[in-house]
Structure formats: C-alpha cells, structure tokens
Amino acid sequence: MPCILITGAAGFIGSNLVKAVYKRYDNPVVVGIDNMNDYYDVRLKEERLAELSQYPNFTFVKGNIADKALIDALFAEHKPQIVVNLAAQAGVRYSITNPGAYIESNLIGFYNILEACRHSYEQYEGGVEHLVYASSSSVYGSNKKVPYSTDDKVDNPVSLYAATKKSNELMAHAYSKLYNIPSTGLRFFTVYGPCGRPDMAYFGFTNKLVKGEKIQIFNYGHCKRDFTYVDDIVEGVIRVMQKAPEKQVGEDGLPIPPYAVYNIGNNSPENLLDFVTILQEELVRAGVLPEDYDFDAHKELVPMQPGDVPVTYADTTALEHDFGFKPSTSLRDGLRAFAEWYAKFYG
C-alpha cells in the first residue's frame, strides 16, 4: 500500500478523508500534518484528531507546511506516493482582515509541497505519483455564467482567498509542465457536515440561534449556494486520488502537463433562506432548539458582504464522466446529520 500524505489532517475535510482511507483500504499508511492553529475553536480539531488516533498506521505531525525544512524532512522520511494538500487558510471574510495568513499557508506552504514533489523523483523510487490539492469555488468570482465550468475563464477574483486558490492552480500547472508531476486540483463548493468549520454560515447560524442572538442573512436572502455534504467531497477526493492524469510527451519533446482541475459540488444551488428554514427544522428535531422557537424574531436580512458572491453553482459533468461520480446527499439529510452531531457535541 502506498504512503499517503494528507496536509490539514485535523481539518474538516482532511480528518474525514483520513477516516475514509482507512475504511476503504487494508492497512494503509497515512501521514497527516496540521498546524492546529486557532483560526477556529481548536477543540474541534482535537476532537477529530482523537478519532484518528485509533488507526495504528496513522502518523500525525504537528507543524506548518510553510516550514520548508519540515516538509522536506517529512518527504525524506515517509516517501509519500500520493499527496493530498488540504492545508490552507480558509475563509473569504478573514482574508480581508488577515491577508498574511493566506500568503504564508496558501502560497508559501503550497510552494513547499510542490518543491518536495519535484525532488521526490530524485530521492526515492517512483517519487510522488499524484498530487491532489484543494482549490475552491471562490475562483469563479462574480462569474455571471452558471453553472460554473472548469472551462470558464477565472481571472477576476473578488477576494485574496480566491486569488491564492487560483494561484495554486497556476503553480501546479507550471510544476506539472516542468517536472512532469501528475496533479489534480479540486474546486470545492461550500462544504458542510458534522464537526465542520464554525466560520461557515450553517455552523455560525446555529451557534447564534442557540444563544438567542439574531442571524444576518446576506444579500437579503437572495444568495444561492451549491452546498456539498462532506462525505460526497471525500468520496470524490478518494476516486480522484486513485487516478492520476496521464504522463505524455508533446511534439516539442517536453511533457504535456499531467494536469487536471475538477469541480466537486452538488450541482443544485439552494437559496439561503430555504437552507436556513431546513436548518432550523432539523435543529428543533434534534432538540438543539425548543419546539416553539420564534425564527422570524431571530433573523435579519442585510446587504451583501465585500468579497462574497451571489451564487455558486458547480458543473460536475467532467467529474461524472471521468470518475462516474456525482455528489447526491440532500440538504435535509446533510443538515440532519449536522444537527444530531451538534446536539451530542455541545449537549
């Protein structure tokens, strides 16, 4: 079984991916790295890590991917064949107040991963067979054409976060071309689920409703999001991991970059107001909120936020064609799982 390196392993998607790899394969060897920063409540990261400690072949390294010496040492010691880079500073709004965090993690950190992949071919037999990395639906900016296709031009980011994710795709392309590194970027669309990120709307809304505070619904409730349940995202990542873009030589004698980018989204955008309604119903059902909760008294419709986009909508044709997979978890099922987890974790 190849060694798989997963960065951001204590993160929402990363920890779920580690679990899925152990369910799917016999005795896989997985190395996870995470800097455990306090961008959100570290208890959630610790909770996820505690669940991962049950796997005997799982090695966890606390560290930052922006630390080049650490990354080089990790590659030298563990010789990963598959690298999944999920470590990144996430969030659109935070990038407006803390731009430095995005440059460090998303640009310098990703550069270190690319360099380590490049040198892996000299260091150990076979080297890195496939680099899979997280991009984001944010790269589409305020793209007017929907659904968003990976063929669309994405040169007008509306946040620094989006700009760093687009940069990752460009950097990966250059490294694929120069050093023949098979790489696949995945543009994730609004991922949600149990033990997720508290900075995401559904989690933040829940925290506020529980405290009896008002929730603000941006763009007067006219935002639409392609909400994607975490299990669907992870299933997509696992399928993509197994099938690297093919190495080929072009007419110029140089590699045709073994490079691909896919959308992973639900392919059915939901209106934010409908989303909030289902969330509230499921929170009542799970006992997180009382039966007689007055929702109207706790919501406020407000204008758009800087850096936000009115709609996200994934065209997943390429993913379906190449991997026979399309996310399918309904919003009701996904939010029910979240509400039940929330009741248990904070209950």
Image (cartoon, helix red, strand yellow):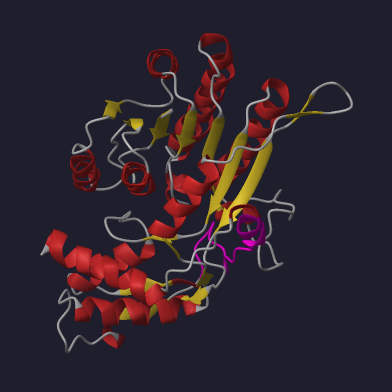
The residue sitting at 56% across, 47% down in the picture is 186
- Look at the picture and state if 77 lies above or below 185: above
Q: Nearer the viewer, residue 239 or 1?
A: 1
Q: Residue 48, how many percent across, how many down?
A: 24, 45
Magenta range = 304-321
Is 308 in the magenta?
yes
Is residue 114 found left or right of 255 in the rendered image?
A: left
Q: Which residue corresponds to the image point at 42% horizontal and 19% vertical from the top-left?
A: 71
Dominant SS in magenta:
loop
Viewer-closest of 336 and 198: 336
Query: For residue 316: magenta?
Result: yes
The quadrant the C terminus occupies is: bottom left
Q: Is residue 134 something one can see in this rendering?
A: no
Is residue 26 or residue 259 the one in the foreground? 26
Judge left or right: residue 254 versus residue 95: right
x, y percentage for residue 346?
14, 61
Q: Is residue 248 above or below residue 159?
A: above
Q: Residue furthest left?
A: 347
Determine if residue 149 is in view.
yes
Question: Given the current orientation, which residue lies at the most extreme top position?
Answer: 122
Q: Please indicate whether residue 154 sits to the left or right of residue 70 in the image.
A: right
